[in-house]
Amino acid sequence: DTEVTQTPKHLVMGMTNKKSLKCEQHMGHRAMYWYKQKAKKPPELMFVYSYEKLSINESVPSRFSPECPNSSLLNLHLHALQPEDSALYLCASSLPRLAGGLLSYNEQFFGPGTRLTVL
Amino acid sequence: DQQVKQNSPSLSVQEGRISILNCDYTNSMFDYFLWYKKYPAEGPTFLISISSIKDKNEDGRFTVFLNKSAKHLSLHIVPSQPGDSAVYFCAASEVGNNDMRFGAGTRLTVKP
């Protein structure tokens, strides 16, 4: 299994709804990422989990709540979103590498994304 | 702070010719550079990477060149094919850091 899967593919939600995005990989990768991508813009990093611990939170609003239940799964819980949160949400995963004695990560493998629309 | 820059938003090339996509970076701590290809409504697909200890990496039709002194890298595609038409993102990561910074992307169109 050499892919990252994301569900659902599309999601439409109201501003008062609670929903979750799911991401799964079975490649033994120990880092998993959430990105947000708006049209014609590069992916913007939201969260990074390294060995199931949150290592980077790029000042994302609390209405986005990540969860990493185990090394293969990554969730993004959504609550009280705004219309400007509508975007493509991408999950990625990567293997660790050692460079100069420091832990870094190899290329990230991306899922197909969840297209989120907030009404 | 845009640490990775792709100054050409678009590039159009004739089929069979060479496509050259450019990328500049400002962070001298970046040690690993990657190119991703993205089709509409899909996630980015990893294409090729290069470590800062090298200045060239080749994989089939794709070659990435790194000029550390100029903080510049480029992706060469030769020969270009219509199926190569996509948005290409340059990305970079720093040793000891599991973050990755993307450029704004260059839309490549290969005309038959």
Image: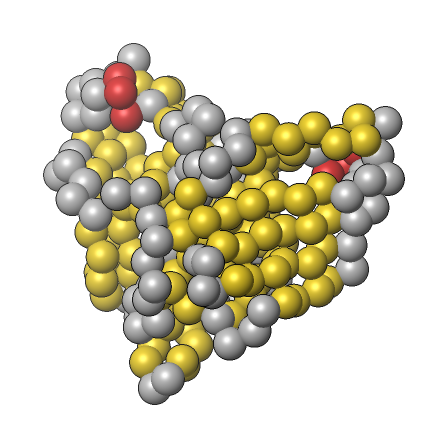
Q: Is residue A33 visible?
A: no
Compared to A6, does B8 lie above or below? above
Whole-percent x, y for residue B89 in the image: 52, 43
Residue for point 61% across, 60% down: B65
Q: Position of residue A62 (x, y in %)?
A: 13, 39
Residue A67 placed where, x, y %?
25, 52
**B63 versus A39 height, above or below:** below
Q: Residue at x 69, y 58 (%)?
A: B63
Left or right relative to B99: residue B36: right
Q: A73 or A64, which lies in front? A: A64
> Image check: B37 left or right of A21?
right
The one of A102 and A8 positioned closer to us in this rendering = A102
- Name which residue lies at 56% across and 73% down: B54
Tell me which corner region of the image, top left, top right, bottom left or bottom right, holds residue B86. top right
Viewer-closest of B93 and A44: B93
Quarter of the picture containing the C terminus of chain B is top right
- Rendered-image quadrant of the N terminus of chain B: top left
The image quadrant of residue B41 is top right
